[in-house]
Amino acid sequence: MLSVEKLTKVYRTGDTALTDVTFTVPKGQVVGLIGPSGAGKSTLIRCVNRLVEPTSGAVRLGDLDITRLRARDLRRARRRIGMIFQEYALVERLTVMENVLSGRLGYVPFWRSFTRRFPGPDIARAFALLDRVGLSAHADKRADALSGGQRQRVGIARALEQEPDLLLIDEPTASLDPRTSRQIMRLIVEICRESGLPAIINIHDVVLAQQFADRIIGLQSGRVVFDGPPAQLTGDALTAIYGAEDWTAMRQSAADDAEAEAEERDEARKMLRAL
């Protein structure tokens, strides 16, 4: 379980990015983190794994207080936190398999990583993960030969190769078309439920967050102004997060996306029956 307690971040400029942010994420829960640009969403995710140093507060992963760790112990702790990036963060000249295996760099000696000689169990797990994300046929392709959706799937497999206890996911669908976005979100949620992994997804698309997340946390000016199930994300709640707006069109878009999701599932079932 992840526990965030009164997390605050004040930059040297005096700008306050986060103020007393407190929440817990139990095993297997997928949290959609929403809010306007500048609300502190990316800062929050980066404070959790201390890519950004919090000013005060605590972040605990199980019994481990991440905010109190020194450099060496922090490096070890980060092995337990898988990160999936908006821009994929792949090494494009390397193959898909090599990118996935880079998720084990924190576990193997330098000479193994330098010569790309990973232990057999690590390689077997990488093949299994590529199969799980639907890329087993692309293991030997260079990363720069893949589509955006395929690259994001490689990023998911790489994060899972770490065998993490938590996933932090930063705008996984920002560069993807609507159908691929739904596929990626569905894949992330299914994997989290299968593995009992807690996850926080920083996402701008409120409709996708409502459709796939188990819980929504809304930030406004660095403070939590909403924390609850997607069904409670009413027009009033959205106004508290984003400001006054007519949310009718968004709710219609959510209904349309739910219908499209159902059609995709029906199509997938028909294809499976035909095999």
Image (tube, helix red, strand yellow):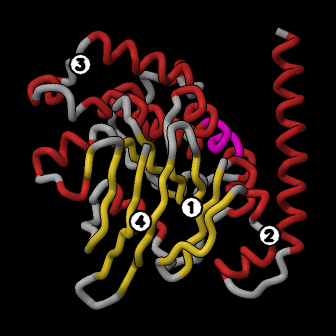
> Which span is picked out in magenta?
182-187
Q: Which residue is mark 3?
A: 118
Q: Do callouts 1 and 4 mark residues in contact (Cβ within 8 Å)? A: yes
- Disc 3 packing (10 Å; few <14; some 14–19; many ≥20): many
Q: Do callouts 3 and 4 mark residues in contact (Cβ within 8 Å)? A: no
Q: Is residue 156 above or below residue 177?
A: above
Between label 3 and label 4, give the one nearer the viewer. 4
Residue at 83% across / 42% down in the picture? Answer: 261
Residue at 63% across / 42% down in the picture? Answer: 184
Residue nearer the viewer, 236 or 251? 236
Residue at 56% across / 46% down in the picture? Answer: 148
Real-space Cα separation, disc 2 to disc 1, in angstroms: 16 Å
Name the secondary structure under disc 4. helix
Amino acid type assigned to the residue bearing label 3 in the image = Phe
> How far across and down, in percent of the image, does residue 128 sit?
48, 16
Q: Which residue is mark 4?
A: 44
Which SS does the magenta portion mostly show?
Answer: helix
Between label 3 and label 2, give the one nearer the viewer. 2
Residue nearer the viewer, 116 or 255? 255
Asked whether, in this view, residue 20 is left or right of residue 71, the answer is right
Q: Which residue is mark 2?
A: 234
Q: Label for residue 51? A: none
